[in-house]
Image (cartoon, helix red, strand yellow):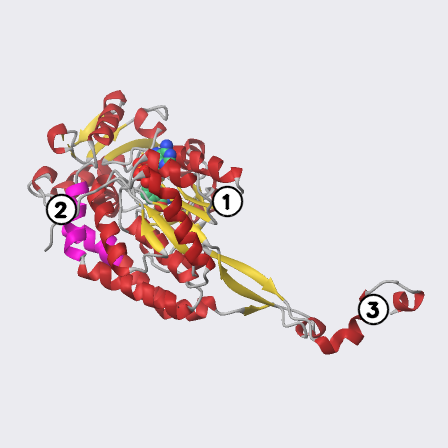
Amino acid sequence: MSKLPAFEHTPLEGIASTVGDIRKSFLSHKTRPLEFRLVQLRKLYWGLSDNKELIVEACKQDLGKSSFETYLTEVSWCMNDIVFMTKNLARFAKDESAPDIALTNKLFGPRIRKDPLGTVLIIGAYNFPIQLSIGPLIGAISAGCTAVLKPSESSPNAAAVMQKIIAESLDPSCYTVINGAIPETTALLDQKWDKIFYTGSANVGTIIAKKAAETLTPVTLELGGRNPAIITKHADPRLAARRLLWAKTLNAGQVCVSQNFTMVDKEILPAFLKEMKNALNEFYPQGARQSPDYGRIVNLRQFQRLKKMLDDSSGKIVLGGTMDESDLFIEPTVVQVESLDDSLIKDESFGPLLPVIAVADLDEAIKIANEVHDTPLGVYSFGNKQEMEKVLNQTRSGGASLNDGFFHASIPTLSFGGVGSSGQGAYRGKASFDVFTHRRSVTTTPSWMEGLLDVRYPPYSAAKQKK
Ligand code: NAD
């Protein structure tokens, strides 16, 4: 395996001209032919494949991710998305004829062309650094856009590896990576874009949306959310515990769709907590700290934020609770909380903290879910079929998994996105193509119809009005 490339900030003074060059390439129409896009996608596939060991090492350095998780959620994830897109691109890109039209309108050949939006900016988040940057890029390439990628500086090794892969694999006049933090992102936001695709926190999402609004630039925002999980008294406590613990220990809980808090029917709470303990022992027989399968918090700032959340909580730690700042380790920690004002419920933890709150029944759980965040990124429910359906009927969220934590997000052909304050717009599967595409309505008026069309021209004589 070659050495990890170094993370370097892109010089600020070069950003405007780099973006200008990428725009010029779009305007040269180079990215329009499908063959060009397919070649770029295939090259990206092989770039990822050739560098998979470097990606694994980068994710290990940045987040302590196990190679299993990196293959599952980063490398294979993106490679499979490319295979899906290359197989289906011609179908997605084909013109659509206007549906349900009268015979007379058919003569104008009304159709929808799938035009690329233009030159797009993709800003990624740190937690799945490859997937959340390369995933949207796959969509941008497929749609025929040119693109600049700004990965998260909080996962610097992954950002540097992506810069290498993209520079070595793709047409450099059409796609490039700009690395850096707030100054570089701010300089990027000062450029002209045809779309900004942002993944990250709602606070920064607001900055991006405000800036984009100044030039009426469209945005797709993939934000966070305080996702509730609901367990009714009819749920299987062992199954719910294992599935929810997995959803909070993958990537050490740094997953936008994992549950932020779990409401459990008071009747089943003791059994659920017991099964949580069993599941933790089964997942990590030597303890999470010793396990090569359990990750670390991305940096000291995030570690201290999580520590403060736990310190500020008035809940009772029922499982876990150990931390080590020197290693950025936080044990999966289950906390029984009493109040909705608890620090662990009020904010998104984005880490391996699992607050659990007892509820009287499903109605109370649904009421709380809607009060805490009326439009989270995900909702998860465990119970009988009617109960899980009731949760869907009485809540809103970007997506939902029944009888599981966030499984919906792993289905490659389901579109993924938030709703309300958890985001706007969606991608993955066909949605990745659509999100960077303009549906351009076109008609062609045959010359021979001029005689028939005469009726539309003034003067609107009485004879014409009779027709
Ligand atoms: P973040 O907002 O700190 O950073 C994301 C990106 O924004 C980075 O590339 C960063 O350089 C840039 N950025 C940061 N501050 C900026 C500023 N002031 N101006 C311009 N750009 C700036 O987000 P994060 O900490 O990387 O990710 C955590 C959050 O993202 C959580 O809320 C999580 O739920 C959310 N998230 C959402 C999804 C999703 O798909 N919906 C996926 C992952 C993470």
Magenta part of the chain: 52-77
Q: Quadrant of the N terminus?
A: bottom left
Amino acid identity at mark 2:
Asp
- Label 3: state its secondary structure: helix
Q: Nearer the viewer, residue 443 or 335?
A: 443
- Label 3 sits on residue: 455
Amino acid identity at mark 1:
Thr
- Label 1 sits on residue: 217
- Label 1: state its secondary structure: loop
Q: Nearer the viewer, residue 438 or 392?
A: 438
Q: Position of residue 314 (x, y in %)?
A: 27, 21
The magenta stretch spans residue 73: yes
> Ligand 1 within 8 A of label 1's CB?
no
Between marks 1 and 2 in the image, the one whose residue lies nearer the viewer = 1
Q: In this image, 31 relative to 327: left or right?
A: right
Q: Position of residue 186 (x, y in %)?
A: 39, 36
